[in-house]
Image (cartoon, grey):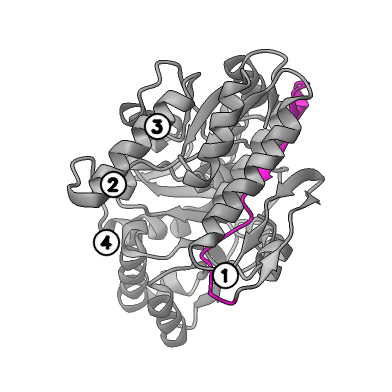
Amino acid sequence: MDDQTKQSRQIGTDSPAATNKVLGLWRGLKSVGGDAVILSMGRGRQNRSRRCHVPFVKRVEGIPIYYARFCHIPILTHMITAVSLLKAIVGLTGKGPSVLVVYNRQWHALPAALIARFQGVRCYLDLEDGAFVESERGLAGLRNKMQRFLFDRVCDSGALLASLGLGKQTGQKRQMACYGVADRPRIERKWSAPLIVLFGGSLMQETGVQCFIDAVRELNSKRPEVMAKLRFVVTGKGPMAADLNALARRIQNVEFLGEINRAAYLQLLESAHIGLCLKRSSSEMGRTTFPSKTIEIAASGLLLVSVAVSDVVEIFGEEDSYLLQSESSTELAETITRIVLQPMAAQKIACRGKQKVDSLCGLKNVGQALLDFLDPGAIKV
């Protein structure tokens, strides 16, 4: 979802990382001759304002996106979105061979997927987030089991997975791990003080916010000479945003920007030196999701400092990143200190990290792999 649409529709529950990944996959398919259309629900949580937004098509970074109808009306909002997607699918599937990829078992897309399936369209599942508690009981557990049952049968042509571990949470036999696309240009940086450390995303306990806060405090109190050569920039939104804002008010070298638009974030990627991914490997989120920000961080030429979580260890090694073996704030503080004391070594590791993701997740490589998986000549919707 683009920033302008998000603002006009009063949406605060979108995922910029998900948007970036989907747009990257579109560019990858296009680079190898695939034809693709992106359908977006264009919705978030309804706010009871009863405002309605008509469906429309818009180009985002040159990519056409169809936004479904969205109304801020309790209960009806879900039916309205589902019908809007259904009408869009009916209009598209009659124009030639096609494939439908449904994102993350979204209930709103199920009617459209059913109709597409009856029309002979190959339906795939793009599973980005797994169920946190597989053995959950009660109504929530029943809903999860029913959701998995239905989507496994409707989207039975295969599953794109955000991480290899998610393969256990789907019944499809054909599976492909897809981490995103690395298509960021090379930016030359001067690795001299102050080194800019970028941390952001969903700001919560599971994404390592407390670890970050404790590490910054430790550096500030125990290694002031190191802290003087650093500048921490924090972006994003979430339940711990207030804690980070308070940290920025107390420590001069920390800047809290909150939620920013895509253009501003890209500028930060160009100016920063180090990118942090502190998703906790011990959390259910860490076990069931892949932090796609790691691809963007390395592809942008930043030095990746990440907890060894999910498939990060399958992609990155000691030669092209700094992988934390624990969720300890002390280990994070020590790693940042090492980078500050050895900036040239850190720069070389960052360069190797970019080379690694450009090779594994390059535009054409991902596009061809995706096209082969979905079947040559298919149109991805």
Residue 36 shown in magenta: yes
User: Which quadrant would the C terminus be assigned to in this image?
Assistant: top right
Separation of marks 4 and 1 at Cα, in angstroms: 28 Å
Q: Check disc 2 and report the residue beneath it.
A: 132
Q: Amino acid at mark 3?
A: Leu
User: Residue 32: which quarter of the image?
Assistant: top right
User: Which quadrant would the N terminus be assigned to in this image?
Assistant: bottom right
Give the extent of the magenta segment: 30-49
Q: Check disc 3 and report the residue beneath it.
A: 150
Q: Amino acid at mark 2?
A: Phe
Classify 92 as above or below 295.
above
Please state the horizontal and vertical placement of residue 256, each as a whole percent of the image: 52, 76
Q: Nearer the viewer, mark 4 or mark 1?
A: 1
* Dot 4: element: helix
Query: CB under 8 Å between callouts 4 and 1?
Result: no
* Dot 3: element: helix
Separation of marks 2 and 1 at Cα, in angstroms: 26 Å
**Crowd tier of the residue under label 1, counting other residues whose Cα lies within 10 Å: few below 14, some 14–19, many 20 or above:** some
Q: Nearer the viewer, mark 2 or mark 3?
A: 3
User: Residue 226: which quarter of the image?
Assistant: bottom left
Residue drawn 66% across the image and 67% down it? 9
